[in-house]
Amino acid sequence: MPPNFKFTKEEILKSALDIIREKGMSALTARSLAAKLGCSVKPIFGLFRNMEEVQQGVFLAANSMYQNYLQEDMSKGEYPPYKASGIAYIRFAKEEKELFKLLFMRDRSNEEEKQDNEEIKQIIELIKKNTGLDKEDAYLFHIEMWLYVHGIATMIATSYLDWDIEFISKALTDGYIGLKYRYCKEGKIDGSN
């Protein structure tokens, strides 16, 4: 009688995440996952309808990991909250390159919701509070700052850059100060946010 493999969905998803971390999303197949688990594909498809459902579970698990990065960096108090969100995004790209690519460097043209509305509202409120900008300008400020942060994160995730956190922090401060100067008529900047 063949061995009876029993796995939970969480164990299967953990193995799937490990495959992606090692070799990227394209390496995640039913066969590679079964090999990682040391079983046939039967236990996988006993808990998941198909590989699309496994991929969706992996995506949710990777996003949960990213949210943990955000919460951790924003609650540490090492940086002001808005800057901490950028640092967390870049740190995730540096430490979880393939998961970053999965979440933030995939084709999103068929997705209806491009950004979590609640998350963006909180960020816009932070910018309004820190700069005195109205909602529309705060949104534009964030989009421009996010392009800068995403560019750094993408270059790190693709191993084009290998900057340390101190240099990244300085670069983000420079970008923030430049945008704040541009958007705020007085140009009075303290550079701490």
Image: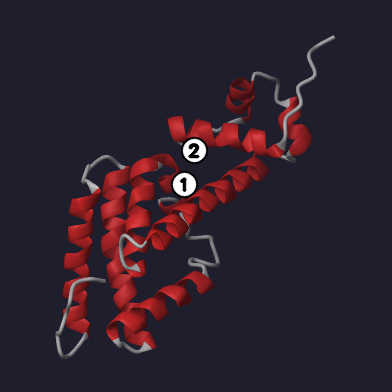
Q: Residue at x 69, y 20 (%)?
A: 39
What residue is shown with label 2? 25
Note whether 96 is above or below 120 in the view shown: above
Do the residues under discs 2 and 1 have CB atoms within 8 angstroms?
Answer: yes
Mark on residue 123? none
Q: From the viewer's perspective, is 152 left or right of 74?
A: left
**Colouring scheme, one of rainbow, by chain, secondary structure, one colour:** secondary structure
Amino acid marked by disc 2: Met
Question: Would residue 26 appear left or right of 136 to someone viewing this image?
Answer: right
Check the image and report above or below for 82 versus 68.
Answer: below
Tell me the residue that label 1 is attached to.
102
Earlier-in-chain disc, 2 versus 1: 2
Tell me the quadrant of the picture where the C terminus can be found.
Answer: bottom left
Give percent across and percent down for residue 129: 35, 83
Q: What whole-number distance in Å separates the C-alpha atoms at marks 2 and 1?
A: 7 Å
- Residue sitting at x 36%, y 63%: 77
In what quadrant of the picture does the N terminus appear? Answer: top right
Residue at 31% x, 52% y: name it: 153
32 left or right of 93 in image? right
Q: Image quarter for residue 171?
A: bottom left
